[in-house]
Image (spheres, helix red, strand yellow):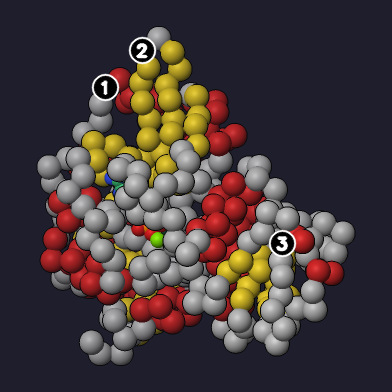
Amino acid sequence: MPETRILSTDEDDMNDAVREAAALLDAGEIVALPTETVYGLAADAFNPDAVAKVFAAKERPSFDPLIVHIASFKELAEVAEMPDDIADTVKSIAGAFWPGPLTFVLPKSAKVPDLVTSGLPTVAVRQSGHVIFRAIGRALGRPIAAPSANRFGRISPTSAGAVMKELGGRIPLIIDGGACREGIESTIIAVEARGDQRPLIRILRAGPVTKEDLQKFGKVVLEKKSTERPDAPGQLASHYAPRTPLLMFDQPGDFKPEPGKKYGLLSYRGDPKTGYMDLHEWDVVEELSPGSGKLMEAALRLFHVMRVLDEAGLDAIVAEPVSETGLGVAIMDRLRRASAK
Ligand code: TXA
Ligand code: MG
């Protein structure tokens, strides 16, 4: 593989970048693209050879299916077979959150190659709201399969530089769209009809669209994390992992530092009263949302901060918990998976 190029999308460069990315995708190549959640490693979803390159570059096992990104609601019919009994609910939820950080799991259409869905009868579909991603999808004229642009099991990239660190030398092109606005991956849901009762909305992966956001559309349940859940095979317990061990504790007092070892703190607010600041003489402290603590800012910075701490030459990273409400659910999900062995 030749060197990986990064193309800017500043005003003057934007059209060229869109054209070049679409041309490479059309030719069966893979390209890293910005989305509002994290950077994705894109391929033409209808080209199995291109999709195979995504799995190879990421070293992703073939049992972990990809998300298919569509450019308009109309394109949904090309990739999914909508069951009649959930069509209205899906349409209302999509109306509220698309384009945006929400993915539906729906029965797949025959046009989607089995490699994309790892042989499952369902397909994960989302419409990204990122201007550049949308422009490339429109220029390609076909759906885009794209997992996060990191090597399998590692920290998702939220900047072009982070993609370069993950996949540099393995892919021909990265489109630089700046930092991702949301910072964590899309919420994944499955919708089920229940006769006269309100539809059931199962959250398979917590994300920027929260349980509270979805409650208006049905009864929402958050699926418990599992390594064996058949309908979200990629939700393995150990994921989003830095190379440096990341530790979490039920009680702050459970942290027993070993002499001579270097510890970094991943703090929510950098506040000694509510956090771990005074627990230890940390070698490095990184804060997710300094001051009053905002979950949106914390989500946005989470993977970046994990990456910074991972590069600081520490023996371990200790993460403070955040409150498990709203976006805090998705943040805690990522921290727990990063700390799982
Ligand atoms: O925000 C996002 O969703 C980003 C951007 C690039 O769109 N993509 C992303 O893709 O996070 P990835 O591959 O890192 O995560 C996709 C998740 C995996 O856990 C996978 O198992 C699950 O989606 N998934 C894909 N197809 C599925 C299906 N048919 N049923 C259940 N889960 C599925
Ligand atoms: Mg991923």
Compare marks 3 and 2 and give the one earlier in the sequence: 2
Whole-percent x and y of residue 337? 50, 58
Residue farthest along the top direction in this orientation: 196
Write the residue at 39% across / 55% down. 236
Whole-percent x and y of residue 201? 44, 30
Say whether residue 217 is left or right of residue 325: left
Q: Which residue is mark 2?
A: 195
- Kindly state the secondary structure of the residue where label 3 is placed: helix
Say whether residue 273 is left or right of residue 214: right
Task: Say the numbered circle drawn on residue 84.
Answer: 1
- Kindly state the secondary structure of the residue where label 2 is placed: loop
Write the residue at 40% across / 9% down. 196
Mark 3 → mark 1, Cα distance in angstroms = 52 Å
Residue farthest along the right direction in this orientation: 273
Q: Determine if residue 221 is in view.
A: yes
Mark 2 → mark 1, Cα distance in angstroms = 12 Å
Which image quadrant is residue 168 in? bottom left
Task: Say the numbered circle drawn on residue 292.
Answer: none
Front residue of this view, candidates 324 and 30: 324
Which three-letter amino acid code belongs to the residue tagged 2?
A: Gly
Q: Which residue is mark 3?
A: 254
